[in-house]
Amino acid sequence: MMRPKILLTIICALILPAIGLAQFKVAPLGNTIYEGVFTGNGLLGTMTYLSGKKSVRIDVGRTDVYDHRANSEDKLFDKARLPLGYFDLDLGSAILQSRGDIYLKEAYAVATVLTDQGKIKVRTTTLSNDNIILLEVLKQDFRGKYSLNWVADSAISPRMKFSYTQKPKKYLANPAGKNGRQGHIKYYEQALTAGGGYTTAYLTRSTKDTDTYVITVGYSQKSTDFTQQTLAYLKKYRVEEINTDLKEHRQWWASYFKASTLELPDSIYQGFYDMQLYKLASATRSGNPAMDLQGPWTSPTPWPAYWLNLNMQLAYSPTFKANHLDIANSLIQMIDQNKDNLRLNAPKPYRYNSIAVGRSSAADLWSPVLLQKGVSLEQASDGEKELGNLVWLLHSYYQYYRATMSKDVYDRLFPLLKEAVNYYLHLLEKDQTGKYYIAVKTYSPEYPKGFAYNTNYDLSILRWGLKTLLELDSERGGKDSLHAVWDDVMKHLIEYPQNSDGFMIARDVAYDESHRHYSHLMMIYPFYDVNWDQKENRALIEKSIAHWQSKKQLLQGYSFSGAASMYAMMGRGDAALASLDILLNKYIKPNTLYAESGPVIETPLAAMASIQELCLQYWNGVLRIFPAVPSKWKDISFSNFLADGGNLISAQRKNGKTIAVEITSQYGGVLKVKLDMVAPIVKIHGKGSYTEEADGLMMLVLNKGTKVSINARK
């Protein structure tokens, strides 16, 4: 079997908690962001790579810098993510060799460049606790002279640069940016037509061997003095306290990596997994903008926005098991802050009790859906005809609730999910047999013939939404006035369309063209409505996945992470690993980024979730420990994975057998666990009880704070 191409880029320890995370190597550095080394603090970020034969390029990004013009049909242009620019480090001499290293635990990157005038290093650190980037040029082994200059990008939607995108008929350019200087601070300011603007500012501190550039980026959507605010921030920053700030920076990252651990016997997958952990906290954090498709690392892209019919859901999928609600919270905050726009996204007749979101948006989640009974939409964009996106996005919110068991989170989630499902209810009718069906055509994402009646995308999302509303309402006595309606629709909703090849795209649309999105298979994953415990559905699951994967022409990276997760649900770890091998070999870039015409962040993170699912799954009411470990992964362990109900799970497998499991109940409750141990030794520390059932199942009833140790008999 081919080993993934990132093999040569990884130097990684096998037992991480004992010796700490090693560095990730990119050698040689390339001329794109996919062959560079990067840093980030959830708002600012850097990417360092080569630019020509004599230059190093250091991109700078800020994740919330979006144009913010009034709502229009051209939101991908008028409300697009805007790139800032880069520092050009001209070495004045030919580059002979190069390499990059990302030091994960300390969260900094080093580009080492050998020239005919000696060796020079560029070290970048984006401080965790300040909106400050430190760009250090280490020149003690460099005999030549270099220059460093800021090169600003144009303040236009990156989508304008792609010939195949449909451009707006009229596009009023933003004003030209301008350079400035105030004392020892250099800056570049960019005003925006819609108001406010952004400024990149930096100052220099030098010693004999090192030049340190202290950089910040300020941004405001309203203020006219955004430049002065940026300069004031930089002036206030005490350069002489950099060492103290670096110590706090390292402490933050050390604490972050301790939240959970995964130890794999494969150094390639270990390095890949750890890089995704690093990437998550570099791209977003609680209190900062949610992840869009780029994170802080920009490049020419046709995707300068948030995509809401797969990408955001996949990007956040590994945060829960990784025990990083601090990362997941940025998405929750985004949803909570934009409830008014979610209502405006629904057609006017339904706004009194419904909310929705279309395919793509800026950070304000304004993205109308036009589906309405009696209204023809043949000329509308596909994204305006996607019904289920918001309910699917709330699947992440639901996971957040189940991880926290917070009354406050419940109180915010329940009305959101109720009103998102209300939009569906407006569009339902009953047929002559008493079955509910969606009475308007909706669009199944990515499929060329996907505008059809009763898409499996929308039926699977609706079933999950109804099931979850019934469950949530039952937690509080089942008193909601719509409880009986949800129950009735759930029991009488039409079946998923299928034919001899398995699940179809929609009622009258077979899956007969290659299709990267698994929108027609979401009842299998991520919702597990049709699952491997249902023996009567196993043949249907197998042929549906096989038929999807058999048409390879348009499959992309997340097609293989999705397949891997489906195989993991089936308990087929070897098939899941083979699918992930294709992903890493063919699609993942040398520094673990990913691209489809431009940077898109979700696929490597979805693969991180797939790796987690080899070790831990929860569906159909059962927590499954080591359900799909590949046969060649004999020794594997994880600690403090976060599971449904807020349970923390640690487990160890040695020589192909599970030898130890520890469960900590943070909030108390009932937990059904499936293990591959025979007659294990169970010890309960605190108040609780357990009963053993058939097929390796164990029922635990635990009080808050109780720990359970489960060990194999020797």
Image (tube, rainbow, N blue to C red):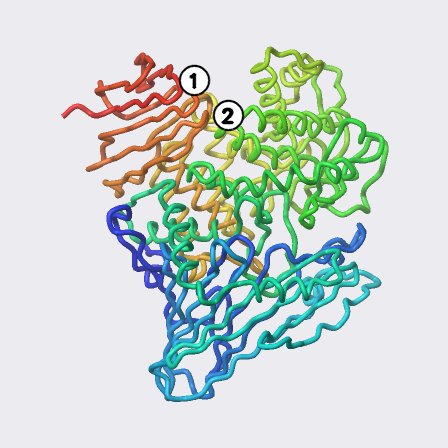
Q: Quadrant of the C terminus?
A: top left
Q: Is residue 461 above or below residue 60?
A: above
Q: Residue at x 52, y 80 (%)?
A: 148
Whether residue 538 appears in this view of the structure is no
Asked which quadrant contains residue 371, the reply is top right
Residue sitting nearer the eye, 170 or 127: 127
Residue sitting nearer the eye, 55 or 485: 55
Give the CA separation, mark 2 to mark 1. Answer: 10 Å
Question: Residue 328, how many percent across, how many down?
Answer: 52, 40
Residue contact at pointers 2 and 1, CB within 8 angstroms? yes
**Few, some or many residues within 10 Å of mark 1 (<14, 14–19, 20+):** some
Asked which quadrant contains residue 312, the reply is top right
| Disc 2, SS | loop
Instruction: Give the side of residue 421 with respect to residue 298, left or right.
Output: right
Question: Residue 88, how many percent across, how many down?
Answer: 53, 77
Q: Is residue 679 above or below residue 133?
A: above
Q: Which residue type carries mark 2?
A: Met
- In the picture, the disc for residue 669 is 1
Question: Residue 628, how many percent across, how many down?
Answer: 35, 35
Residue carrying label 2: 405
Q: Which residue type carries mark 1?
A: Gly
| Disc 1, SS | strand
Q: Residue at x 27, y 42 (%)?
A: 633
Q: Residue at x 37, y 65 (%)?
A: 101
Which circle's residue, 2 or 1, is located before the other in the chain? 2
